[in-house]
Amino acid sequence: MRFLPLLFLFAFAMPSKLAYQLFDAKGKTTDYEAMRKEAFKADIVLFGELHNNPICHWLQLELAKDLAKEKGKNLVMGAEMFETDNQLVLNEYTQKLITEKQLKDESKMWNNFATDYKPLVELARNQGLQMIATNIPRRYASIVSKQGIGALENLPTEAKNLIAPLPITVDLQLPAYANMVKMMSGEAGHGSPQMKPEYFAQAQASKDATMAHFILKHWQAGKTFLHFNGAYHSDNFESIVWYLKQANPNLKIMTISSVEQPEVEKLAKDHLNKANFILAIPEGMTKTY
């Protein structure tokens, strides 16, 4: 009888060290190619990320590159990380009119811009693609968190052009917002006497509504809008998705959620049905900040 070398057998017994695993909504393993094909057919793709996770940012860039190859100028990109009042300077940079230093000096960039979002902006710049700033200016979201959604009516006309059309409907019964109200009310031990719980959820909704509005403003039939946002903004087909569907129920929207687990060979039950595709990443993965 011929025996296999012990080292050979040991190698097959060692557990795998996957950097990530993709699943469908039901928890069945899938792969990048399946996700890419579905993204190509979608009107809008919402890539929900974990802001400090390098696997998210790498896969975002890979998907953006592949869609750019297939769709050309019919790909539009946008991101939560850029606020609508920075659109002009973002346009000037992607059109190669200003330097990177001027972009950084004259706009509000997240601290991890250089490592995590600059590659996406550079792709837009090099391919001649639109990069859309979709998020509500933080000063207006701050007003909502202190005074409620109705306070946006007091903004000047120029400011209202930078947010979703008023009045913004907020359904606090949606689980995404109801959970926030619960958390801020103190039921989960995180209550804040300085902030009304419903105002906190309304501030979140003002971001979701504004992102949805500016996605639709720059989307046309035949194009794909690839949007990057924190996973909570699109998880469970709520938040941004809800506002998009309110405006146009016929949209084909594909969502991607990102989660961290101790092991990624099987999707945890808590993450089932979070999105069309769930990107599971080991908890021990290094962070970008």
Image (cartoon, rainbow, N blue to C red):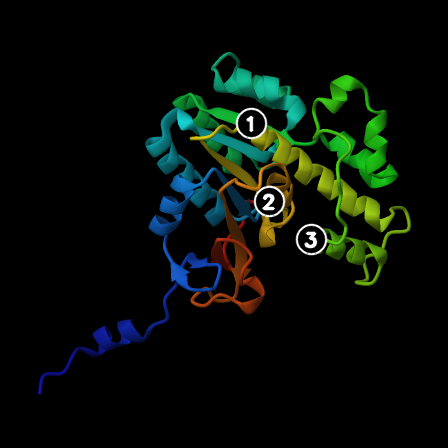
SS category of the residue bearing label 1: strand
Q: Residues within 10 Å of mark 2 (few under 14, many from 20)?
A: many
Where residue 54 appears, as percent x and y from the top left, is: 49, 47
State the image coordinates of residue 145 (x, y, percent, origin top left). Answer: 82, 40
The quarter of the picture where the C terminus appears is: top right
The residue indicated by pointer 2 is 241
* Mark toward the viewer: 3 or 1: 3
- Please identify the residue farthest to the front as the structure is shown: 250
Residue at 60% of width from left, 23% of height from top? 104
| Left or right, 156 with reference to 115 | right
Kindly give the residue lying farthest to the bottom in the view shown.
Answer: 1
* Residues at marks 3 and 1 touching, judged by CB atoms closer than 8 Å: no
Residue named by callout 1: 132
Please name whichever residue, 54 or 181, is drawn nearer the observer in this view of the structure: 181
Which of the numbered marks, if any, corresponds to residue 288? none
Rendered-image quadrant of the N terminus? bottom left
SS at circle 2: helix
User: Residue 152's image quarter?
Assistant: top right
Q: CB of mark 3 within 8 Å of CB of mark 2?
A: no
Q: Is residue 190 above or below residue 117?
A: below
Q: Position of residue 282 (x, y in %)?
A: 49, 60
User: Can residue 283 be seen in the rendering of this structure?
Assistant: no
Q: Amino acid at mark 1?
A: Ile
> What residue does disc 3 label?
176
